[in-house]
Each structure stands twice: as structure tokens, then as C-alpha cells.
Image (cartoon, grey):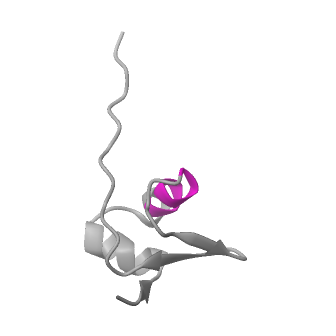
Amino acid sequence: MGVSTVSEIAKKWNISERSVRNYCKQGRVKGAVLKGKTWIIPGDAEKPERIKSKTN
């Protein structure tokens, strides 16, 4: 299984590192743990679905 960093996951999922951090902070990445200032993410974590914004 192994663990991955935010930058590795961002490249794997083809999104920004900021988006990965936001997903982790929101609890949407299963198994992600914050150690100090670093997110530890399981290597087999799946990309969460995007939440569609509300339109008026």
C-alpha cells in the first residue's frame, strides 16, 4: 500500500496540490492524516468526486 505526499497525489490525480490539501482538510480523502504540517495520504487513496456549486 505505502503512503504518498500531497505533491505525488496531485500529479497522480492531475489536480493542484492546494486541491489535494483541501480534500484532506474536508475529510474527503479516506485515511489521510495530518502530521505537523504534512498530510500523510495512503498510496491507494481514491480521488473524491467534485461537489458541484449551486447556481441561482
- Point 35% across, 71% down: residue: 45
Task: Please state if 31 lies on the left or on the right of 2 as rendered.
Answer: right
> Is residue 24 covered in magenta?
yes
Range of the magenta residues? 20-26
| Residue 14 vertical placement versus 41 (above, below) | above
Instruction: Looking at this view, name the residue that lies furthest to the bottom.
Output: 2
Residue 52: give x, y in percent of width and height. 32, 32
Name the chief secondary structure element in magenta.
Answer: helix
- Point 69% across, 74% down: residue: 37
- Point 31% across, 75% down: residue: 11
Say which of 27 and 7 sits in front. Answer: 27
Residue 50: give x, y in percent of width and height. 32, 44
| Residue 32 vertical placement versus 40 (above, below) | above
Image quarter (top left, top right, bottom left or bottom right) of the N terminus: bottom left
Say which of 10 and 50 sits in front. Answer: 50
> Is residue 1 covered in magenta?
no
- Point 58% across, 71% down: residue: 33
